[in-house]
Image (cartoon, helix red, strand yellow):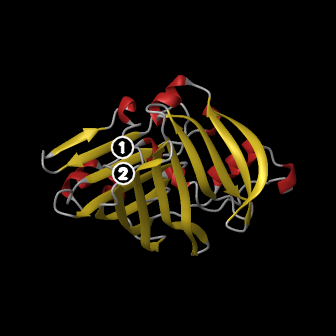
Amino acid sequence: MNRTLRIVAACAVGGFLALPASAELSAREIMEAVDARDDGDKSSRELEMVLIDKRGNQRVRKLQSYGRDVGEDDQSIMFFLSPADVEDTGFLTYDYDEPERDDDQWLYLPALSRTKRIASSDKSGSFMGSDFTYADMTDRPTDHYDYTLMRETEVEGHKAWQIQAVPTTDREKDETGYTKAIVFVRQDNFVVVRAVYWVKKGKRLKYFDVKQLEQIDGIWVPTEMHMSTRKGESTLHKTVLYSRDVKFNQPLDEELFTVRQLEKGP
């Protein structure tokens, strides 16, 4: 899932920007470097999504995902392969670089033989029962946030910046469903490896962690990500997402990233 779970996906390496010494970087410069990182092109990967309820019951979903760059924009498509109740469900995203342009997303529901366009007002909703939202599937415009560098710290033995990100518009808060985030960016590769999100409704927090990070063809790829939803001391739900068989520069036809293919299946 190409930059998948883009909040998630803030997870490949930067390196395109002419950056000053790291000690001189502002919070915004760090987040711009995160946004500018190379996340690969023409990718394919297998995904396993594990949904865990508060009683510990698990549901496992298998997916196949593809992604590609179109200029400064990104397109991705994923197909649910199993279990039977979600088989052939598909999800297509056009993630536009232009900050003021709404991203396009479509969800194909085979039981209804219907493709649903995801409205902006619905993007803060749960994606297929997971702890990720539709908005999490796209990059968020850096222009729509105020960033504050809180401190330098360590995450799993790696130096990291701790940054607070606050949406500057009600539209951004409504679309993401988050009123604030604190993210942890590794200093050696500009990967967001941990984050806490304040959910607008329900007095809940979401905790994101990259548990496994691998370098594949020179690109940092999170291959195990956790997102949990908590209220107070209780964990309400948790999603674990594994990426396997990640490949870049695959011969992907542009027709793969269309509503027609979404409805046809992989």
Residue 181, quarter of picture: top right
Instruction: Classify 10 Å Cα crowding around label 2: few (below 14), some (14-19), many (20 and above).
Output: many
Among all residues in the image, which is located at the extreme front? Answer: 233
Front position in the image: 27 or 35: 27
Expressed as whole percent of the image width and height from the top left, the position of residue 160 reads 73, 58
Foreground residue among 83 and 114: 83
Please count the marks in the image: 2
Query: Is 229 left, or right, of 15 in this rendering?
Result: left
Please determine whether, in this image, residue 212 is positioned above or below residue 197: below
Any mark on residue 126, and which? 1
Q: Which mark is residue 263?
A: none
* Residue drawn 44% across the image and 31% down it: 201
On the image, the x and y values in percent for residue 97 come to 54, 42
Is 178 rendered above or below residue 24? above
Q: Residue at x 61, y 73 (%)?
A: 218
Q: CA distance from mark 2 to mark 1?
A: 6 Å
Contact, mark 2 vs mark 1 (Cβ under 8 Å): yes
Q: Which residue is mark 2?
A: 130
Does residue 2 appear to the left or right of 169 in the view shown?
A: left
Q: Write the residue at 43% across / 33% down.
A: 202
Q: x and y percent of residue 40 in the render?
A: 54, 64
Q: Is residue 116 above or below residue 56?
A: above
